[in-house]
Image (cartoon, rainbow, N blue to C red):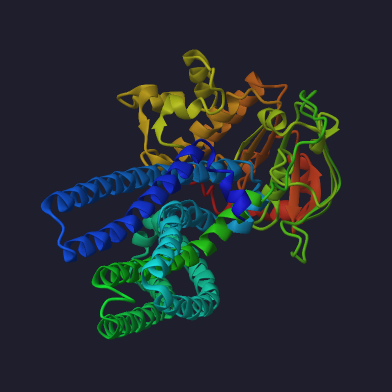
Amino acid sequence: MLKELTKSIREFKAASIKAPVFVSLEVILECIIPFIIAQLVNQIKAGCGVDVIALYGLSLLVMAALSLACGAAAGSYAATASSGFARNLRKDMYYQIQTYSFENIDKFSTSSLVTRLTTDITNVQNAYMMIVRIAIRCPLMLVFSLLMAYIMGGKMAVIFLMVIPVLGIGLFVVAKTVMPVFRKGFRMYDNLNASIQENIKGMRVVKSYVREDYEKQKFDKAASDVCAQFTRAERILAFNNPLMQFCLYTVMVFVLSFGSYTIITSRGMDLDVGQFSALLTYSFQILNSLMMLSMVFVMITMANESAQRIVEVLREESSLKNPEHPVFQVKDGSIDFDKVSFRYSKKAKKMALADINLHIRSGETVGIIGGTGSSKSSLIQLISRLYDVTEGTVKVGGLDVRQYDLETLRNQVAVVLQKNVLFSGTIKENLRWGNKEATDEELMEACRLAQADEFIRRFPEGYDTYIEQGGANVSGGQKQRLCIARALLKKPKILILDDSTSAVDTKTDALIRQAFRRYIPETTKIIIAQRIASVQDADRIIVMSGGTIQDMGTHEELLARSEIYQEVYTSQNKGGDTDEK
């Protein structure tokens, strides 16, 4: 785990080294100062002059200033190192997530990935800052102070060696107990984020159905669960403090009582006042170091689980990989499904698609009709290799899709998914997702084909109109047409519309299909739709049910023989067209 995390230090390696170096210098100076003070006390006791006192005072002042400067430098470098490490770690995670397939995203969940990119990295950043500064300072201070305490106090320093094992055993027990609690708590944190994300994304639905109170109750429960779990963890960690206090007061009582007794009985021969004052200072330094180590321990204990979750993301490899010698050219838009079966997870008992045999010629227009859950979207996701088949082969342009370079394949297979997504930015910026080099004329041509040009020109800013996050300031139909135009700009060999005209009226839908026939005749077009009107003029229509192809043919052929198709056609025509406006 540490090896994986340290890869993200990179250009901040120098700062990560300089921080401990300056901390070490600071510790050495702080440990020398009590020794000099002890010498000064003995000199004063012996009746030294002002010149000697002034010399000692100047030495202490210089050392204190150097210690302060070293501490400030260490703090600055530690902050630079930890912030830079967190930035690189967040970047590495984000870049790794970009390589994930849908299967990988499904494994982690969106809310969990967000938590790992934010809360978990913050925990690790704080722990790293402590590691490069306090976790270095405390052991060094402990060792040097113990050494100086032995020099100044002799056998009295043994008390420290007796206390440290007691403290170490106690901290180990606390860590072993609290780790599973933190692990469960972070999973609850993921669930809380999922609840928040779902609520915000579905705010319009929540308000439409007046379900604010229900959502509040759901949030309160999730938040209470997180609170209870982390409270339990903090209660376990709280044993750390009384254990520290016990060790601290035990040492202080021993040093004060035994030290005073030694001074009195030996008349200052075995232990004088200067040595005793230095010993007290070193006692405070040792105990302070132990307490700081306790704080570091708490932070690292919490960060350990976060680090494990981060490394899981960094180590996760995409289930979709480029072949060793990828093909960088797609010959045409022909599509072949040969005995294809597919399931979303290895644990899934049922196949989402079963024994699919389908052959689509390049330039052909194919419609797909089927009820909810018939796996229409699953079928088309295999073409652009958003998922890999479980059994069988999917071919595009005569080659297995697994032989292509992924970027090449997806540039030639444009998919307008059922859930249309627009990003914050102007209409032009959103359209250029399809082709970043597209000219303004090409943008307008694509929008004319998608029947989007007219409504865009009605906006005061036209193509420079700013789109809010998720396309909140445009209607569903407008969003769909912009997404279609964006896909057309890729000039693909295969164009897939996954129920992408459901929010437009039948007239606009017909105009879009007419434009496709006229301007992109060589592009293979697959149209998934709920309305038969959207696919009835296709070269072939596929009827799906339960993850299998039930029938295939033209509109007239299916009306004559397919019961499923007849039922859909009759229900839509008898009840009138149920278009979404």
What x and y, as percent, mark residue 419?
A: 54, 46
Label total for image:
0
Name the residue located 35 percent from the left edge and 27 percent from the top edge.
465
* Residue 226 in the figure: left or right of residue 281: right
Along the line of sight, which residue is nearer the eye, 471 or 14?
A: 14
Residue 251 position by quadrant: bottom left
Let me know if residue 555 appears in the view. yes
Quadrant location, the C terminus: top left
Along the line of sight, which residue is nearer the eye, 471 or 69?
A: 69
Query: In the figure, 418 relative to 110: above or below?
Result: above
Let me know if residue 475 appears in the view. no
* Residue 362 in the figure: left or right of residue 569: right
Name the residue located 63 percent from the left edge and 19 percent from the top edge.
519
* Residue 433 in the figure: left or right of residue 59: right
What x and y, as percent, mark residue 125?
A: 44, 52
Along the line of sight, which residue is nearer the eye, 362 or 181?
A: 181
What x and y, as percent, mark residue 553?
A: 80, 41
What x and y, as percent, mark residue 255?
A: 32, 80
Query: In the figure, 90 relative to 492: above or below?
Result: below
Query: In the figure, 463 relative to 132: above or below?
Result: above
Name the residue located 40 percent from the left edge and 23 percent from the top edge.
463
Residue 522 position by quadrant: top right
Quadrant location, the N terminus: bottom right
Along the line of sight, which residue is nearer the eye, 455 or 19?
A: 19
